Amino acid sequence: GAFNPVTKQIDLNAGLLLEDNPQQVMETIMHESRHAYQDFAINHPEQVSVDAETIKTWEYNFDHYISPEFDFEAYVNQPVEADANDFSERMYCEGYCSAA
């Protein structure tokens, strides 16, 4: 999946939707939704409850984004990706892990 900050759209890989893995689909949607929230926070800091330092970190990270093709470990560990991964895993578990 990918969030496009220009169009404000989330794109999903069609192959992901064909697989029988609803957890991966849900976590991908939540992960990309978190990137949309990060983008919104950067552009509208007065409308979110995120501290200014975090917003500054996200903005810097988006301006200096590390693609997975360049360095996968650095990609996964950069602030916006770590935050989106934590968010998607936490939200999935809050909605589904406790119900199982």
Image (spheres, rainbow, N blue to C red):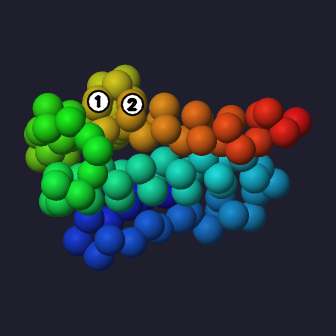
- Disc 2 packing (10 Å; few <14; some 14–19; many ≥20): few
Q: Distance between the residues labelled 2 and 1?
A: 6 Å
Is residue 73 depicted above or below 24 in this figure?
A: above
Picture coordinates of residue 77 (x, y %)? 34, 25
Residue at 23% from the left image edge and 71% from the top image edge = 6
Residue at 23% from the left image edge and 57% from the top image edge = 47
- Disc 1 packing (10 Å; few <14; some 14–19; many ≥20): some
Picture coordinates of residue 15 (x, y %)? 65, 62
- Residue 72 appears in view: no
Find residue 78 and name its label.
Answer: 1
Secondary structure of the residue carrying tag 2 is helix
Mark 2 — residue?
Answer: 82
Residue 25 lies left or right of residue 22; in this view the side is left
Residue at 26% from the left image edge and 41% from the top image edge = 50
Secondary structure of the residue carrying tag 1 is loop
Residue 98 lies left or right of residue 77; in this view the side is right
Is residue 46 depicted above or below 8 in this figure?
A: above
